[in-house]
Image (cartoon, coloured by chain):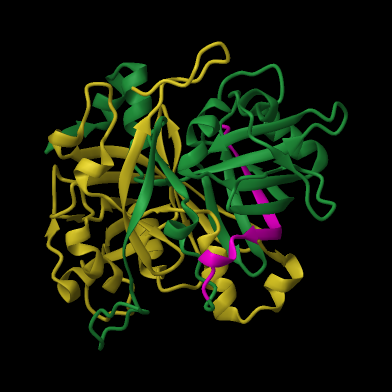
Chain colours: A yellow, B green
Amino acid sequence: MKHFTLQDILDAEQGFRRDFINCLSGYKSLNLIGTINQETKVTNLAPFSQVFHIGANPPLVGVLFRPHSVERHTLENIRQNKCFTLNHVMASFYKAAHQCSARWKISEFEATGLKEEYKDDFKAPYVSDSPLKIGCSLADQITLSINETVLIIGKIEHVYVEEKALGEDGFIDLDKLGTVTSSGIDAYHVGKRLGRLAYAKPDKPVKEI
Amino acid sequence: MKHFTLQDILDAEQGFRRDFINCLSGYKSLNLIGTINQETKVTNLAPFSQVFHIGANPPLVGVLFRPHSVERHTLENIRQNKCFTLNHVMASFYKAAHQCSARWKISEFEATGLKEEYKDDFKAPYVSDSPLKIGCSLADQITLSINETVLIIGKIEHVYVEEKALGEDGFIDLDKLGTVTSSGIDAYHVGKRLGRLAYAKPDKPVKEI
C-alpha cells in the first residue's frame, strides 16, 4: 500500500491534496440545496456533499460550509431567511446538478434548466424533479474555530418522498429512488445494494432482512 | 409524493422515525473506527456512517457521536489516548463490520475475526483487510448543545491506500477499492460510477474527465 504521512500531504501540490483528502471519507451524500434571497427574490441552487444526520428526535440535519467559497450565497440566504431545502439528485440530472457549482450571475435554476417548485407555503424552492425533498428551518449555526468552516443545523419541517421507495418500517430505498452519491470533488455514482442486516447481537449470527 | 410534516415525524412510532430520518441525507460514508484502551489495552472497532471532510489544509475529518450510545467505548478511547483509525469497508467483510455494532464484552476484532494491524508506531489499531486506512490524532471536540451529540475533529496523520486506486491527480477510485457505502441504519451498498466532471464554469458545457 502507498503510505502518506501528514508531512507528505502538506508538501503535496494543492490540487493533488484537495482531490486526495476529499476522497478519504468514502462515498458522500449528495444534495442540491435550494434557497432564496429575501430581498431580491433571486433563487440559488448548489450541490453539497457535506450533509449528515444529527438526530431523529427532533429530526436534525447538519450541513458544513467551507469559508469564503462559492457556496456563500447559500449560506447568506439561509442566515437571512432561516430556511433551505435539500433535494436528492438522480442520474438523469447529475450533470445539471454539477453545473450548479459554477459561479453564475443568474439563478442556477434558470442557468441549468432545473425547475423550481414551491410547496405548502415553504419559502425556499425545491427541485421539481427530485425524488426526495426536505424543507428545513435554521435551528443552529456553529463556526468551527479550527478552520472557520460553518456547521448549519437544520430542523426537518417537511419531507416529500416517492411512495414506491418508502417501506412500512420507515426505510427509504435509495436504489429505487435513483439517488446519486458523490466522491472526491467531481465524481458521481449510483448505488447497488448488498443487503440490509438485522440489529446486531453478540449471541446471534448476522442475518439479512 | 408522500408528504410528512414535522408533526407527522414526531408522532410516528420510534422505530419508523429512526429508520426514516437516518435515510434522508442519502448514501453515507462507512468507516470502521479502531481504538485502544490505554490502560487495559483492549481494542475496539465500531462502524460509523457519520464521517465527513472538514478541510484539506490541514487535512481534517469530522466524526459525529450520538450521546449515550453503544459507541461510547470508541469516544472514551479517543478522549483518553487522542488517536483513532478510520478503515474503509469492502463487500467481503461488510457483515463482520455490521457485527461490530453489537454490544460485545470482548474486542470486536476478536469477536468478528477482523484482523488488527499496527503501523509506523501509531497507537490505534488498523483493520488489516481494509483497502484504505487513515490514522488520526484528536484535534478538537465540540458538544452540539442542540442535542448533546459530540463532534470529534481528527487531524489526518497517516494514509495507507491501495496503489491501483490512486490517480496521479490525487483522486482515489472508490469503485476500484471496493469501498462500501451505507444508508439508513442497516443497509449496505457498493457504488457504480456515472462519471467524473470537469470544474464547472458558466461559459462552458459540462465535460466528462
- In front: B160, or A171? B160
Q: Is residue A143 magenta?
A: no
* Residue extending farthest right: B39
In this image, B31 relative to A194: left or right? right
**x and y, in percent, of residue A45 in the image:** 27, 64
| Depth check, front residue: A139 or B139 | B139
> Image point 50% across, 73% down: which residue?
A68
Quadrant of the frame with the C terminus of chain B: bottom left
Q: Is residue B34 above or below residue A6?
A: above
The one of A74 and A179 positioned closer to us in this rendering: A179
Q: Is B102 drawn above or below residue A26 in the view shown?
A: above
Q: Can residue B27 be spotted in the picture?
A: yes
Relative height, residue A127 to residue A98 (above, below)? above
Residue B5, position as x, y percentages in the image: 23, 32
What is the count of numbered marks? 0
Q: Quadrant of residue B168?
A: bottom right
Nearest the viewer among B122 and A132 is B122
Q: Quadrant of the N terminus of chain B?
A: top left
Q: Position of residue A96 (x, y in %)?
A: 22, 69
Q: Is residue B157 magenta?
A: yes
Percent of width and height locating residue A58: 40, 29
Q: Is residue A76 above or below residue A174?
A: below
Q: Residue at x 50, y 20 (%)?
A: A200
What secondary structure prevails in the magenta region?
Answer: strand
Residue lying farthest to the bottom in this orientation: B203
Whether residue A40 appears in this view of the structure is no
**Residues drawn in magenta:** B148-167
Residue most extreme to the top: A203
Q: Which quarter of the figure has residue A129?
A: bottom left
- Residue A41 located left or right of residue B196: left
Residue located 71% across and 78% down the image: A11
